[in-house]
Amino acid sequence: MTTPTADFDTIVVGGGPSGATAAHDLARRGLNVLLLERGFRIKPCGGAIPPCLMEEFDIPDHLIKARIRSARMVSPRGESVDMPIEGTFVGMVDRDEFDPWLRERAGDAGATVMPGVFKSLQYEDDLISLTYQTKDDDPRSVTVTARSVIGADGARSGVARATIPDAEKTPWVLAYHEIIEVPENQKWEAYDPDRCDVWYQGRLSPDFYAWVFPHGGNASIGVGSAHKDFSAKASVAALREDCGLTDAITKRKEGAPIPMKPMKRWDDGRAVLVSGDAAGVVAPASGEGIYYAMLCGRLAADAMQEFLETGDAQALGVARKRFMKLHGKVFWALGLLQRFWYGTDKRREKFVAMCRDPDVQSLTWQSYTTKKLVRRRPLAHVRVFFKDVAQLLGLARA
């Protein structure tokens, strides 16, 4: 019996950082890839990336809109703690430019990039039949076939819900931000173009945080929360007023769900694998997602290539195993941090106070900018541990 020929080796659903990275990596290896993007919408995102991302994923300097040299943590009482970044920086990108560049690179590598909304998929013998709706002036349903599918279509992934049990149970927060224009002669005392501001105040977010992140000529002002009755727009309006940014020109407003925990399974055991937000790889507590999404996309591409070469569906599970080996401990620790320290304003006050500590600052920035656990300073880790315990027991003053 002759095996039917597929239209594509892999269909990647979702053209954000994870999907575009997976499509690029597979296409440049000679595989026939369709990258399906839902209308080229922009996800709400502070836009922070570590320097190691630029090297690992060959990101050009011109996409960096600002190089952040410090962060300011603001407590419920309005106390500010500045955390300088010594010897390095945090890069800031604008997703309005960053994501299209990644999709264009995937296209240059050989992937077919198409606008379309995923509708359904089903198995037909050894192939997957996937239907999507076009996004042109005359929308219609189109069905194509593939040997495999990567779902990189966000926190409430349609691909995941169609193929992976309990995918809909992944916890998420609602993220919302407004992109404002920063005048060249801005004189806002509460805004620094080289500093990220993070607000830990229950009035702005009962369980997460709010932010003001510079993007060069623009700035992202946003907030996140898992509370269903929370008004993100009202919170951002309050933050803009606090910072003196109420009258700044608003260029865009965006909102979307952000996952807060990696899914326990990323594949369906046959030929479908999810990646990025669809797999739940946004860091708890910090909400950082771009680096982890792109790494996840790369690992998904590696696993999918092995599956296509061997036909062994067990290869699909390697993507999650490799990711969790690299970053599972960090995600676990950040999850504990968020659940405890973000619970009340009293705890938030103590959390911000801890950020004054030089050991906390040094270890935080080294781990963030290199994406590696810092093991060269064991005494610093011990000191941070005992200071954290003192805060937990109320033995240290906020």
Image (cartoon, rainbow, N blue to C red):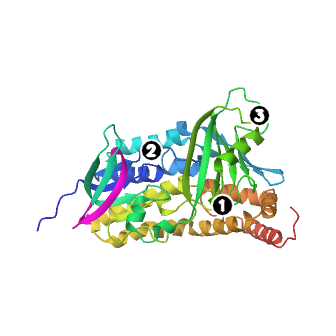
Q: Which residues are magenta?
A: 111-128
Task: Please report contact status of discs 2 and 3: CB closer than 8 Å, yes or no.
Answer: no
Please determine whether, in this image, residue 82 is positioned above or below residue 385: above
Dot 1 crowding, Cα within 10 Å, few <14, some 14–19, many 20+:
many
Dot 3 crowding, Cα within 10 Å, few <14, some 14–19, many 20+:
few
The residue where tag 2 is placed is 102
Q: Amino acid at mark 2?
A: Leu
The residue where tag 3 is placed is 188
State the residue in front, 293 or 13: 13
Ranked by sequence position, the earlier of labels 3 and 1 is 3
Q: Amino acid at mark 1?
A: Ala
The local secondary structure at tag 3 comes to loop
What is the x, y in percent for residue 268?
A: 37, 70
* Residue farthest toward the top in the current orientation of the protein: 185
Q: Quadrant of the N terminus?
A: bottom left
Q: Amino acid at mark 3?
A: Trp
What is the x, y in percent for residue 215?
A: 62, 38
The residue where tag 1 is placed is 285
Ranked by sequence position, the earlier of labels 2 and 1 is 2
Task: Say which residue appears at 59% left-offset and 46% top-offset.
Answer: 47
State the residue in front, 200 or 21: 200
